[in-house]
Image (tube, rainbow, N blue to C red):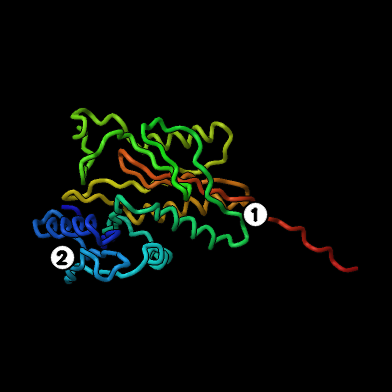
């Protein structure tokens, strides 16, 4: 049985409705245990609410995603060893929300410091590689249409052959190459979505908090630094580079006399 605490479903549209429904089925069949599922959507009449409704273990939050994450994660603590963890169920259509939260946290932590979203350099060797207007680099090992709700098994259902690639390895190798070229790059901070139960993929809130901690570590010295951040699965990824300028150290004024 998969044991979880709270499961946050991003979006209450067609994907979120499917995921919340699958989680309920998994719990009913004894394949999953959780305290509650929380569906976050700015539409109070979203499809998931209309079709599934609230239950003692299913709640709906009407809010923008970024505002919800700021409220929940800014004060979150990692779960202790052996305790059930909180998880996020991402939507395939969402922006790079976890990077946006990590970026906002960095700007709160160092309000006077130059902090920017920089282009992710280098090649990952993926057939799909595009940069969005907001600077997020979207990459994929698939140059075909993937099955809906694919759980990325060892045998790829689209090609009928072994899945010989792993996005996490590709991103880690990119970070090593950047460091090898002299870039002061930390990470990667990876939020890895894996199939959890009944066709639902998740990444842990603990991983998100660890990513925020990695950014804090990167910036503590006050020297220029960058952190490679990605929300990925085995096949696909959204990547950003968070760049930290040096902390300005103004000389103190000479004493009188």
Mark 1: secondary structure: loop
Question: Which residue was labeled with disc 2?
Answer: 51
Q: Residue furthest front?
A: 133
Q: Position of residue 127 (x, y in %)?
A: 36, 31
Number of numbered labels in the structure image:
2
Q: Is there a contact, CB below 8 Å, between mark 1 and mark 2?
A: no
- Would you place residue 175 above or below residue 57 in this image? above
Left or right of 227? Residue 235 is: left
Q: Nearer the viewer, residue 125 or 221?
A: 125
Left or right of 131? Residue 159 is: left
**N-term-proximal mark, 1 vs 2:** 2
Figure quadrant of the C terminus:
bottom right
Q: Position of residue 190 (x, y in %)?
A: 39, 46
Residue at 31 percent of width and 31 percent of height? 165
Q: Residues within 10 Å of mark 1 (few under 14, many from 20)?
A: some
Q: Nearer the viewer, residue 160 or 86?
A: 160
Q: Residue furthest left?
A: 29
Q: Quadrant of residue 37?
A: bottom left
Q: Position of residue 220 (x, y in %)?
A: 57, 53
Left or right of 9? Residue 21 is: left
Q: Quadrant of residue 157?
A: top left
Residue at 18 percent of width and 71 percent of height? 54
Q: Residues within 10 Å of mark 2 (few under 14, many from 20)?
A: few
Mark 2: secondary structure: helix
Residue at 58 percent of width and 34 percent of height? 182
Q: Residue furthest right?
A: 257
Q: Nearer the viewer, mark 1 or mark 2?
A: 2
Mark 1–mark 2 Cα distance, whole angstroms, equals 51 Å
Question: Which residue was labeled with disc 1?
Answer: 247
Q: Nearer the viewer, residue 69 or 144?
A: 144
């Amino acid at each position: 049985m998969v044991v979880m605490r709270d499961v946050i479903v991003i979006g209450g549209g067609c994907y979120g409705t499917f995921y919340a429904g699958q989680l309920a089925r998994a719990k009913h069949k004894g394949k999953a245990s959780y305290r509650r599922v929380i569906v976050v959507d700015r539409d109070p009449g979203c499809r998931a609410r209309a079709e599934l409704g609230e239950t003692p273990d299913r709640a709906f939050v009407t809010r923008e995603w970024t505002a919800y994450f700021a409220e929940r994660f800014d004060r979150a603590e990692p779960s202790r060893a052996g305790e059930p963890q909180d998880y996020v169920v991402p939507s395939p259509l969402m922006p790079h929300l976890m990077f946006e939260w990590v970026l906002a946290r960095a700007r709160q932590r160092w309000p006077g410091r130059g902090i920017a979203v920089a282009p992710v350099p280098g090649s990952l060797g993926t057939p799909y590689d595009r940069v969005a207007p907001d600077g997020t680099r979207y990459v994929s090992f698939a140059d075909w249409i993937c099955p809906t709700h694919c759980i990325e098994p060892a045998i790829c259902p689209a090609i009928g052959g072994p899945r010989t690639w792993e996005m996490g390895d590709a991103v880690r190798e990119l970070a090593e190459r950047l460091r090898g070229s002299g870039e002061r790059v930390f990470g990667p901070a990876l939020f890895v979505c894996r199939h959890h139960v009944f066709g639902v993929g998740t990444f842990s809130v603990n991983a998100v908090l660890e990513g925020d901690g990695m950014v804090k570590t990167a910036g503590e010295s006050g020297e220029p630094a960058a952190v490679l951040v990605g929300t990925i699965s085995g096949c696909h990824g959204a990547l950003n580079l968070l760049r930290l300028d040096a902390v300005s150290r103004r000389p103190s004024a000479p004493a009188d006399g």
